[in-house]
Image (spheres, helix red, strand yellow):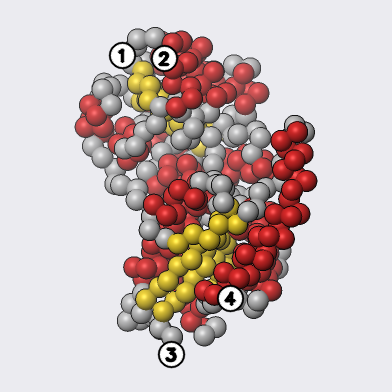
């Protein structure tokens, strides 16, 4: 019997789809044990030829089969129209390339983690009678998950709310897999690491690795007011593109630490008393991992408004409060953060609710199911 488990992983475009796929691949390699019919694991990734996966997956040591696929552009610019005109040809080329790679690799199972880059490999796997499982990060499932959920062997969910959008699918609540997140650090040590005061409460403004321009534009105008009113300090990841702008407008203030990108996120999360951030799947998984309360400001242009769905699920659980971008502009932030920051019991309750959402065994549970389903199909 073939004792090497061959897994095709399909996903890409953004870190929210790639990071879970990498976490699954790495855990699968650790999970081959005497209890499994498989003694080793071989992984092949499928992704777009221009997304973040072209860097992240080879860096992690995995083989990547790139496809010339692009997403449908919603832009009415010439570049957007050109992208859409080229889409049928790219789709055909991607199907041919995916079929060839699937035949050569002959996977026992294909795992789709979403994004347009996963659509062709998932579709072609189903057409070639290769078992498929899907991993969904968001409260409102992505298009690929909605299209193929009913034909998948199982769909792994991060939010219970996603189930109502996937009629006829075999779903399993697992949580969202993450990689390489450290443990909570000493808060005073974390404050010293960032050059901040260990005696002051800390607001952590996080716009994602690229920052969030609307958040940055708001806080450069209002940060001094918030500091004055609430007696706090701010740790602020601006993103590389906005660092100089923020430095120019904020000036020198010992209660504000501006950074383009924070590598030591375990220290940043450990220092934070309250988050202000978007509602992308990976960010929310991380703040739940550290049990942090949050004010969530969903990205209004996110596909199918999925960030607001994520944020509302967090709010329903009591872990966060949701503030839409127009409300931020209308001055709703100060009353909201005052309500939270001046009520220690409320912060504690939100932190407990955030920690209660986390699922530390998500990656292992997903991999156990993948091994079980693949083994049953051998």
User: What is the C-alpha distance between the residues marked 3 and 2?
Assistant: 62 Å
Circle 1 packing at 10 Å, graded few (<14), some (14-19), many (20+), is: few
Q: Nearer the viewer, residue 224 or 339?
A: 224
The percent position of residue 366, horizontal first and vertical second, equals 47, 66
Circle 4 packing at 10 Å, graded few (<14), some (14-19), many (20+), is: few
| Discs 4/3, front | 4
User: What is the C-alpha distance between the residues marked 3 and 1?
Assistant: 65 Å
Q: Is residue 26 left or right of residue 299?
A: left
Disc on the earlier residue, 4 or 3 = 3
The residue tagged 1 is 254
Circle 2 packing at 10 Å, graded few (<14), some (14-19), many (20+), is: some
Please report the residue visible at 75 percent of the width from the left and 45 percent of the height from the top.
84
Q: Nearer the viewer, residue 230 or 41?
A: 41
| Discs 1/4, front | 4
SS at mark 1 in the image: loop
User: What is the C-alpha distance between the residues marked 4 and 3?
Assistant: 19 Å
The residue tagged 4 is 103
The percent position of residue 321, horizontal first and vertical second, equals 54, 34
Disc on the earlier residue, 3 or 2 = 3
User: What is the C-alpha distance between the residues marked 2 and 1?
Assistant: 12 Å
Disc on the earlier residue, 3 or 1 = 3
Q: Which numbered circle lies on residue 218?
A: none
User: What is the C-alpha distance between the residues marked 4 and 2?
Assistant: 54 Å
């Amino acid at each position: 019997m073939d004792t090497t488990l061959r897994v095709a992983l399909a996903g890409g475009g953004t870190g929210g789809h790639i990071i879970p796929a990498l976490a699954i691949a790495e855990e699968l390699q650790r999970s081959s044990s005497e209890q499994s019919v498989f003694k080793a694991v071989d992984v092949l990734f499928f992704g777009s030829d221009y997304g973040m996966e072209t860097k992240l997956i080879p860096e992690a040591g995995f083989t990547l089969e790139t496809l010339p696929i692009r997403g449908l552009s919603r832009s009415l610019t010439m570049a957007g129209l050109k992208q859409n005109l080229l889409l049928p040809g790219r789709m055909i080329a991607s199907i041919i390339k995916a079929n060839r790679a699937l035949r050569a690799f002959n996977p026992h199972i294909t795992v789709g983690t979403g994004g347009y880059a996963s659509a062709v490999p998932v579709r072609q796997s189903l057409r070639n009678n290769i078992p498929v499982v899907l991993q969904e990060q968001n409260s409102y499932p992505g298009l690929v998950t909605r299209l193929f959920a009913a034909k998948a062997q199982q769909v792994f969910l991060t939010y219970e709310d996603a189930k109502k959008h996937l009629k006829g699918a075999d779903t399993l609540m697992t949580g969202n897999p993450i990689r390489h997140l450290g443990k909570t650090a000493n808060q005073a040590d974390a404050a010293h690491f960032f050059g901040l005061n260990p005696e002051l409460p800390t607001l952590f403004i996080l716009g994602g690795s690229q920052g969030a321009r609307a958040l940055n534009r708001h806080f450069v105008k209002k940060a001094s007011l918030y500091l004055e009113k609430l007696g706090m300090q701010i740790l602020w990841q601006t993103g590389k593109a906005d660092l100089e702008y923020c430095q120019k407008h904020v000036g020198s203030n010992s209660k504000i630490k501006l950074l383009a990108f924070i590598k030591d996120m375990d220290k940043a999360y450990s220092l934070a008393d309250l988050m202000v951030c978007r509602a992308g799947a990976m960010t929310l998984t991380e703040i739940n991992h550290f049990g942090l309360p949050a004010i969530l400001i969903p990205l209004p242009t996110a596909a199918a408004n999925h960030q607001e769905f994520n944020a509302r699920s967090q709010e329903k659980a009591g872990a966060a409060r949701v503030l839409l971008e127009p409300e931020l502009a209308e001055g709703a932030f100060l009353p909201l953060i005052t309500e939270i920051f001046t009520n220690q019991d409320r912060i504690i309750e939100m932190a407990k609710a955030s920690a209660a959402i986390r699922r530390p065994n998500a990656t292992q549970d997903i991999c156990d199911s993948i091994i079980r389903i693949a083994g049953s199909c051998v």
